[in-house]
Image (cartoon, rainbow, N blue to C red):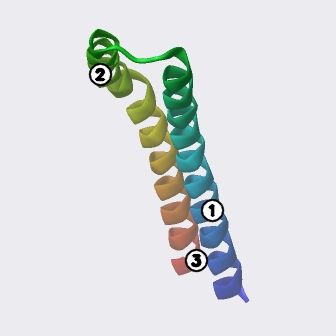
Amino acid sequence: MVTVELIILLVVLFVLALGGTFFVFRQEEKKMKRYEQEGDTVEDELQRSRDYESHSLKSNVPRLLLIYVITIFLGLTAFFIYIF
């Protein structure tokens, strides 16, 4: 019985991590659509590229890192509870 509960918990954690990843992806996709609607010049694209390189490391990567750290921590915790 515990094995089934562990598998269900791990599947739920996986789905939540996947959902969080898609959430971050959708935010970036919305930005790209907004940029397309505003119109593009070569200078604007270059500036956005530079901004993305600097801001992505400050916003998206920490969000994804947090999602995956929590998921891995909860998964390992559930696994160790199952073992003991």
Q: Mark 3 sits on what residue?
A: 82
Q: Nearer the viewer, residue 44 or 14?
A: 44
Q: Mark 2 packing: few (<14 Cα in 10 Å), some, or many (20+)?
A: few
Closer to the N terminus: mark 2 or mark 1?
1
Q: Residue 6 carries which label?
A: none
User: Which amino acid type corresponds to the residue marked 2 in the rendered image?
Assistant: Ser
SS for tag 1? helix
SS for tag 3? helix
SS for tag 2? helix
| Image quadrant containing the N terminus | bottom right
> Which residue does the image show at 50% across and 70% down from the upper left?
80
Q: Which of 34 and 37 is in front in this view?
A: 37
Q: For this view, does 36 lie left or right of residue 41?
A: right
Closer to the N terminus: mark 3 or mark 2?
2
Q: For this view, does 44 lie left or right of residue 36?
A: left
Q: Which mark is residue 15?
A: 1
Q: Do the residues labelled 3 and 1 touch (CB within 8 Å)?
A: no
User: Which amino acid type corresponds to the residue marked 1 in the rendered image?
Assistant: Val
> Which residue does the image show at 55% across and 30% down from the upper left?
33
Closer to the N terminus: mark 3 or mark 1?
1
Q: Distance from label 3 to label 1 (Cα)?
A: 20 Å
> Which residue does the image show at 67% across and 65% down from the upper left?
12
> Which residue does the image show at 34% across and 14% down from the upper left?
41
| Image quadrant containing the C terminus | bottom right
Q: Distance from label 2 to label 1 (Cα)?
A: 31 Å
User: Which amino acid type corresponds to the residue marked 3 in the rendered image?
Assistant: Tyr
Mark 3 or mark 1, which is nearer to you?
1
Q: Mark 2 sits on what residue?
A: 49
The image position of residue 26, as x and y in percent, is 58, 40
Q: Do the residues labelled 2 and 1 touch (CB within 8 Å)?
A: no
- Residue 40 against residue 63 in the figure, above or below: above
